[in-house]
Image (tube, rainbow, N blue to C red):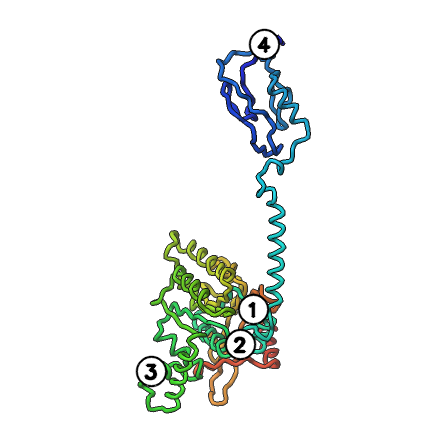
């Protein structure tokens, strides 16, 4: 090669320059080498000259340049690549130098906070319903998470949910239960709760004028309404008139989380999840359901909530008991939920042909046994069915004793 020949100041693409253009390349972070040690070539744009191929022997392969160009600047740059590189940490600002150490410190702090939270749990202060087997299924008490109560229509979901809410209010302090009756008005849900609270018939709680001459019923109704007012700091009802939009519910949750006394545990009951909407979400119905499910799940962590909601099964497996397969592909809640109960009531389906039932002393008809199957449980290792004697006329729910539990299990699953 002619030693007096000066090639045009063209640089391969790896140096970030176009032919004949002066462009600084210092202080660039290379994704392969880390710190870029190339000096900034300060050159002027010059006219391009045609160069014989044999005098510009450059080829590119996956590893970079295999034949180095005969250019002093590039020769120097390539030589520097062969030398040990200055660690990138030395070229970063002081705050970034400490980035990894800071991450380690933050992680250790989160571990300490988690351990402190775990030690705060006290079996004596855990949320309880007073139903021994039900409470034991949670290793002593209900904890934050998303709980789904799913069943075909008219199986007793709302009655079961109201009974659990009523027991929680009666058996715990420092709690606030919000019941969102999204498919019934206050005129319908309040009488249903009073009937559960006082063990009277729904129609007796709903139609006071019709029963105003019955002193016993009137006393129980008044006692139920008085209970609601005396416990307004622990139990509040809402219906769709207040709003069924998740944006409004989140505003309410934020306000209550900031204003309730420290240590208050908040539970929200939705009847039903399917009636929640998102006012701000723009998309089809299926995408909105996914958005709502993810948002509600997020609340349980961000605001430390227990959320329990009912859900109608979109399809049932004939007259057979529901399974997880009846949920899959129909609702994102099945995936997001920490616990899924599948509720079944054979008497509701089979009437007097039912095999799983119980008898009341003052009723000749077969009475329903509520089957509560723990179909999915990320809270504890409990994974079987609990059975409850249910009296629809009095909205009475009683947990069957251990002997009857075993008998029903044999009947259903043998």
Which numbered disc flags the more N-terminal residue, 1 or 2?
A: 2
**Gap between marks 4 and 1, in whole Å?**
84 Å
> What element does badge 2 sit on?
loop
Residue linked to disc 1: 374
Which residue sits at x=50%, y=21%?
22
Residue linked to disc 4: 5
Q: Residues within 10 Å of mark 3 (few under 14, many from 20)?
A: few
Residue linked to disc 3: 207
**Gap between marks 1 and 2, in whole Å?**
17 Å
Query: Which corner quadrant of the image does residue 243 belong to?
Result: bottom left
Residue 164 visible from this viewpoint? yes
Residue 330 visible from this viewpoint? no
Instruction: Evaluate if marks 1 and 2 touch, with contact meaning CB atoms under 8 Å apart.
Output: no
Which residue sits at x=56%, y=13%?
7
Residue linked to disc 2: 129
Which numbered disc flags the more N-terminal residue, 2 or 4?
A: 4
384 relative to 48 in the view: left or right: right
Q: Residues within 10 Å of mark 2 (few under 14, many from 20)?
A: many
Q: Nearer the viewer, residue 112 or 239?
A: 112
**Gap between marks 3 and 2, in whole Å?**
29 Å
Which numbered disc flags the more N-terminal residue, 3 or 2?
A: 2
């Amino acid at each position: 090669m002619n030693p007096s020949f000066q090639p045009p100041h063209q640089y391969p693409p790896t140096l970030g320059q176009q032919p004949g253009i002066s462009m600084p390349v210092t202080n660039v972070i290379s994704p392969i080498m880390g710190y870029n040690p190339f000096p900034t070539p300060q050159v002027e744009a010059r006219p391009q000259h045609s160069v014989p191929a044999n005098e510009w022997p450059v080829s590119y392969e996956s590893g970079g340049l295999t034949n180095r160009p005969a250019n002093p600047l590039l020769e120097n740059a390539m030589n520097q690549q062969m030398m040990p590189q200055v660690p990138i940490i030395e070229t970063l600002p002081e705050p970034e130098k400490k980035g990894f150490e800071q991450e380690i410190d933050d992680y250790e702090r989160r571990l300490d906070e988690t351990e402190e939270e775990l030690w705060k749990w006290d079996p004596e202060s855990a949320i309880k319903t007073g139903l021994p087997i039900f409470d034991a299924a949670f290793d002593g008490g209900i904890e934050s998470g998303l709980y789904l109560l799913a069943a075909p229509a008219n199986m007793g979901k709302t009655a079961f949910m109201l009974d659990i809410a009523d027991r929680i209010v009666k058996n715990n302090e420092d709690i606030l239960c919000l019941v969102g009756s999204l498919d019934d008005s206050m005129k319908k849900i309040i009488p249903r709760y009073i009937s559960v609270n006082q063990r009277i018939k729904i129609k007796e709680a709903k139609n006071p004028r019709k029963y105003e001459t019955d002193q016993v019923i009137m006393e129980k109704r008044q006692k139920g309404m008085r209970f609601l007012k005396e416990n307004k700091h622990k139990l509040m009802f809402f219906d769709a008139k207040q709003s069924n939009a998740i944006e409004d519910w989140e505003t309410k949750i934020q306000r209550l989380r900031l204003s309730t006394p420290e240590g208050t545990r908040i539970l929200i009951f939705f009847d039903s999840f399917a009636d929640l909407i998102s006012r701000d979400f723009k998309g089809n119905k299926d995408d909105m359901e996914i958005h709502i499910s993810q948002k509600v799940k997020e609340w349980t962590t961000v605001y430390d909530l227990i959320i329990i909601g009912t859900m109608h099964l979109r399809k049932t497996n004939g007259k057979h008991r529901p399974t997880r397969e009846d949920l899959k592909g129909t609702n994102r809640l099945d995936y997001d939920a920490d616990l899924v109960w599948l509720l079944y009531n054979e008497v509701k389906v089979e009437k007097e042909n039912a095999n799983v039932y119980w008898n009341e002393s003052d009723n000749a008809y077969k009475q329903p046994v509520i089957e509560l199957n723990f179909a999915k449980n990320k809270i504890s290792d409990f994974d079987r069915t609990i059975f409850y004697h249910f009296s629809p006329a009095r909205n009475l729910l009683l947990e069957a004793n251990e002997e009857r539990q075993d008998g029903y299990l044999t009947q259903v699953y043998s």
